Image (cartoon, rainbow, N blue to C red):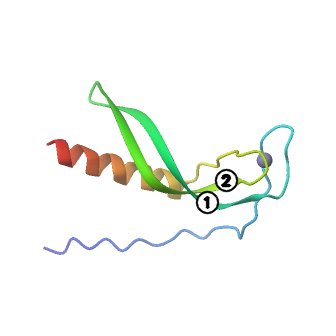
Amino acid sequence: MTAILTKQAPPQRPFPWRCRASGCGNWSVVLAKIEYYITTERGGVLLDVRIPELEIPKCKDCGELVFTDAVDDQIEEVIEAHLEKQA
Ligand SMILES: [Zn+2]
């Protein structure tokens, strides 16, 4: 079984990014590690999932979170792992 997933980091613009929150617009978005809770629905069941260390671009000034594909991937992985544990 070759179950090794080679994850290629998608090319990303270098930080900091410009914050897109209204009233902010500062170049203060950098990659942060945060604890994140998400409620998601799978097969008609609501799941509360905790992600202890989500790497996500975040504005240092206003706290705006920027959801990227990489962030979605992390969330998806945690949800999958969560579901496997329950199975
Ligand atoms: Zn901001």
Place of residue 54 in the rendered image (x, y in percent of width and height, measured from the top left) = 49, 55
Q: Residue at x 33, y 46 (%)?
A: 79
Secondary structure found at label 1: strand
Q: Is residue 43 above or below residue 6?
A: above
Badges 2 and 1: C-beta atoms under 8 Å apart?
A: yes
Per the model, the C-alpha gap separating discs 2 and 1 is 6 Å
Residue 55 lies, in percent from the top left, at: 53, 59
Q: In the displayed structure, does residue 35 sit left or right of residue 82? A: right
In the image, residue 15 above or below residue 64: below
Say above or below: 34 vs 50.
Answer: below
What amino acid type should be assigned to the residue bearing mark 1? Answer: Ala
Q: Residue 38 in the image: x percent, y percent?
A: 45, 38
Q: Which of pointers 2 and 1 lies earlier in the amino acid sequence? A: 1
**Dot label at residue 58:** 2
Q: Which residue is mark 1?
A: 32
Report if the beta carbon of the residue with label 1 is closer than 8 angstroms to ligand 1.
no
Left or right relative to 24: residue 17:
left
Queried on whether the Cβ of the residue with tag 2 lies below 8 angstroms from ligand 1, the answer reads no
Question: Position of 57 compared to 17: left or right?
Answer: left
Q: Where does residue 84 sit, x and y in percent of width and height?
A: 20, 48
Quadrant containing the N terminus in the rendered view: bottom left
Disc 2 residue crowd, few under 14, some 14–19, many 20+, Cα 10 Å: many
On screen, residue 61 above or below 8: above
Question: Residue, x 82% and y 37% (percent of image)?
Answer: 22
Residue under the point 49% across and 45% down: 36
